[in-house]
Image (spheres, grey):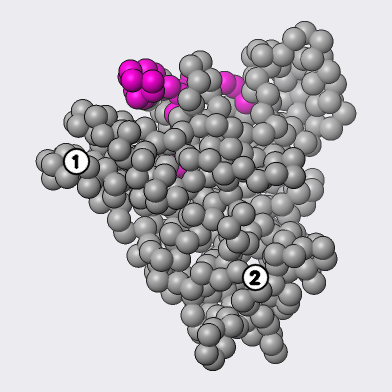
Amino acid sequence: MYENLVQHTPKINEQLARYGVKFGIYKNGKFNERLFPFDAIPRVIDAEAWAPLEKGLAQRVDALNAYLRDIYGEKQIVKDGIVPAEFAFASAGYMPEVEGIMPSKGIYSHISGIDLVEGKDNEWYVLEDNLRIPSGASYPAVARRLCRRCDAETFREEPIRDNRNYGTLLRAVMDNVNLGGINVVLTPGRYNAAYFEHTWLAEQAGCVLAEPNELFVENEVLYYRGTGVNQRVGAVYRRLSDEYLDPLCFLPESLIGVPNIMSAYRAGNVAIVNAPGNGAADDKGIYYFVPKMVQYYLNEEPILKNAPTYLPVYPDDMAYVQDHADTLVIKEVSEAGGYGVVFGSNLSPEDLELFKRRIREEPRNYIAQEVIDFISLPTYIGGEIVPRKADLRAFVLSGDTTVVWPSGLTRYAREADSSIVNSSQGGGFKDTWVLYQ
């Protein structure tokens, strides 16, 4: 199925480099930009396997959006004791500044990136919900285009669902919530880790790509400084974190925000995609409660499973974590990108005891999960095909309806026996083929 593509791997990576398909990391005061290694052997998901996965992803995102409407509104799920107040409101992602603001059409997470792994038991497990500014859709889309150029025959013969519609889906989402004016992709600039993607998204969705100094607010309306007349902005897909979005509302030292954009948002004059405050629902501690949200808001049984998770704030879970820390993966709830993840089996006895003490001292800051024995995928590295652990970031777009993009970003570990696949931790990526049959 993919034999010809393997032969073209060097050529495809060469073209990816030429197109500037890179991933930047800003760390320790330095910006390092590197190629995002691509493996031409795709992850393949047949139609039978995709159908429940697609349904489960849409269900999960619908529940998360319902939770965000509730937690910044009536807070009924807390009043009913489903999510404890200390989890809902102590989350680092919870933002009192957006209390009572209902976004356009009631949608908070317009673009959701749901990270999953496929267990060796043939079950899919959700590891993380990314509802703030999930990145990565551009990489499989661009790689697919280059693969098609190198080996058009494979894509004519195989029943692969087309993934060239991501820009169309994004445009529909933005048009759906647009409050009058142009659509803008707001980028912090070329030194952002995902700047390549920002430019690609703007082009594919037919939006204006703008840096913060090209936007301004006047009389609670957001405008884009064009070369001629200033243009009103009706929807802005912001690709910078909440805390940097508006220096007059959040961090006053932010140089990449747009002053008063929150006043325009609060007045109902511009839609912000994704909505500020979404971190209240993708906190790693809140993750534990998502299956309960599906039952509470949708009155349905969850289709997708969480990894078995323990919250040390609960006495029974604390006892289990303390007794089994050497077999668990422990995560700091405020970290992302593969940081703050510790496998107990990799720690020395002394370090393990130190970590257990930290958990006892700050139980809300940690979750612990059973290690999922997830599948490896064939991967072309160093001239041979070898197994490597891989996850999947699926992209779910919420507009008039909730749609799952029939593709996704498959990330793989470049090192043998490693389960860390994040691009920020040195991982590579694959295309994801969803088949018609």
Mark 1, secondary structure of its residue: loop
Q: Point out the stretch of residues depicted in magenta.
A: 369-394
Question: Mark 1 = which residue?
Answer: 151
Residue 205, quarter of the rendered image:
bottom left
Q: Main secondary structure of the magenta part?
A: strand
Q: Give percent across and percent down for residue 189.
A: 60, 61
* Rendered view: 324 above or below 235: above
Question: Mark 2 = which residue?
Answer: 212
Residue occupying image coordinates x 53% and y 44%: 23
Pointer 1 or 2: first along the chain = 1
Residue occupying image coordinates x 13% and y 42%: 153
Kind of residue sitting beneath label 2:
Pro
Kind of residue sitting beneath label 1:
Asp
Q: Is residue 55 visible?
A: no
Q: Give percent across and percent down for residue 15.
A: 34, 45
Say which of 78 and 10 sits in front. Answer: 10
Say which of 78 and 349 sits in front. Answer: 349
Instruction: Please state if 431 lies on the left or on the right of 293 as rendered.
Output: left
Residue occupying image coordinates x 48% and y 40%: 35
